[in-house]
Image (spheres, rainbow, N blue to C red):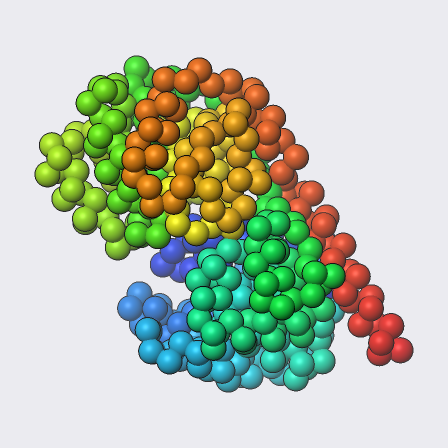
Amino acid sequence: MKLQIITNLFPLPWEPDRASFNRQQFARLACRHETRITVVVAWLDAVRNRSGTSDSSRLNGMEVSYLRYFQVPGFLRASYALTLFMALLFQARKIRRFAPDCLLLSWAYPDAVAGTLLGRLLKIPVVIKVHGSDINIHGRYPSRARQIAWSMSSAQAVISVSRDLAGKLEKLGVDSNRIHVVYNGIDHAVFHPRDKQAARRQLGLDPGRKPVVFVGNLKKEKGCRELLDAFTHVAGNAPDADLYFIGNGSEARLLQETASRAGLESRIRLVGGIEHAAVATWFNASHVVALPSYNEGVPNVLLEAMACGTPVVATKVGGIPEIVQDSSGILVTAQDSDALESALAESLVRQWDAGVIRQTVREFSWDANCQQVTGILAAVAAKDDEVRT
């Protein structure tokens, strides 16, 4: 098949490790199908990062182009789909010449709404992939929720990364027959158990200590503040534990200042952003991986950590309870620092079995994911061919 993907969730020139899950999935789809990707970028983000983002490039066999569109951050957000659609019109002729069998739109708003309009204009069938925050956040606002519901009902199929998210789509009015639950995959060639002490030495860590590791965007909704607060209370009774934040974001300065005020700057470290493949070493070095988010779909951070045999402490939100078992982690209520403190304390003393943890996620793979996605895309394309003939 020929596949045209439209999404904002993809590596950017100034953020090369962004949305690694989409990069991995799309690269595997490109091994099976002729694939082109249009990465949509808000114009102000491009200006701030001094990148034209207009050049095309090739990545893992895919032609990737960047399309800027106009929006005023935080203002008239209900109009973002319209302004994105207007920008996509400039690529309509190019997409028509490519003649894709299907449009794959990855992110509900504004990407899927604008992409569905484009699909109708060009008479190309549409498949939408939703991730979690795109529904959990944008779905709270009636004007955006109506647009999302329209696009989902107009699409030929919708791919959800969890059963929980599929249920939320049904509450928006999306026909359950259109929804397909397809969990994200894991690159088991990269994320697998290694010697924990060796991993710690490789990172320059004391092999005898117990690192608690957070990987993700340093923002309030990821529960960074609660994690730091919980750790400061656990630290006294766990003198061999340290906390590492891996990633960048708006909370970085606050986290550093709070750690300093608590007198724990030597035990709470902000590592910054690192390459996706390097995360595997951190997961293997970790005693536990923590992700106390307020909202999630099915975070690959947890899947990849467990694939390394590392236990997790996370919140009972989104699809997380669908992937974390009692033998692989501890789940708590979001925004509950006391519960998070107890879970961290327990995770540091419990005897975990890395082999058992890894077995809980052995069936999650990108090959299986892409086989399912290909089946959905092929069925949509075949049905469209029948209609045309």
Total residue callouts: 0
The picture places residue 243, in percent across and down from the top left corner, at 28, 32
In percent of width and height, residue 294 lies at 39, 50
118 horizontally vs 268: left or right: right
- For image coordinates 47% across by 59% down, the residue present is 136
* Closer to the camera in the image, 49 or 234: 234
Compared to residue 203, the image places residue 174 above or below, namely below
Quadrant in which the C terminus appears = bottom right
Percent coordinates x, y for residue 387 in the rendering: 85, 76
Q: Quadrant of the N terminus?
A: bottom right
* Residue 84 seen by the camera: no
The answer to whether 331 is drawn above or below residue 359 in the figure is below
The residue lying at 44 percent from left, 71 percent from top is: 141
Left or right position of 378 against 45: right
Is residue 166 at least partly visible in the picture? yes
Residue 15, placed above or below residue 233: below
Above or below, 371 against 80 in this view is: above
Q: Position of residue 14 (x, y in %)?
A: 36, 59
- Residue nearer the viewer, 41 or 110: 110
- The residue that appears at 54% across and 75% down in the rendered structure is 146
Q: Quadrant of residue 214?
A: top left
Q: In the displayed structure, does residue 349 sit left or right of residue 165?
A: left
